[in-house]
Image (cartoon, rainbow, N blue to C red):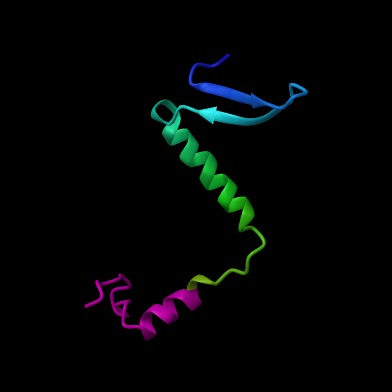
Amino acid sequence: MVEGIQFVTNAAGKKVAVLIDLEKYGELWEDFYDAIITRQRAGEPRESLESVREALKQQGKLNVGGGYCRRAP
């Protein structure tokens, strides 16, 4: 068994959950969690980079000449 990892089992002995020592595996957990969120959002509509740039320009949050963002007032 791996130190810092514990499996939770049901009455039949089947693994149903896991406990992770976040002090030891916190960064790995963050990567795992990000992957879950990415998978959940896979079917959501996406915006093109160009449409995001245009929206930022209209809001005055994108410097049209330099192509970099400036802080909002």
Magenta-span inclusion, residue 22: no
Number of numbered markers: 0
- Position above or below: 45 against 33: below
Secondary structure, magenta segment, majority class: loop
**Is residue 51 a member of the stretch shown in magenta?**
yes
Residue 40: x and y, percent?
63, 54
**Residue at horizontal 54%, vertical 39%?**
32
Rendered-image quadrant of the N terminus: top right
| Relative side of 57 to 2, left or right | left
Q: Quadrant of residue 53?
A: bottom left
State which region is magenta. Answer: 50-73
> Would residue 49 be found to the left or right of residue 44 on screen?
left
The residue sitting at the front extreme is: 11
Judging depth in this view, the residue of 62 and 45 nearest the camera is 45
Residue sitting farthest toward the right:
12
Q: Give the side of residue 61 with respect to residue 15, left or right.
A: left
When the figure is inspected, residue 52 is found, relative to residue 38, above or below; the finding is below
Figure quadrant of the C terminus: bottom left
Q: Report the residue at 53% width, 23% height from top.
A: 5
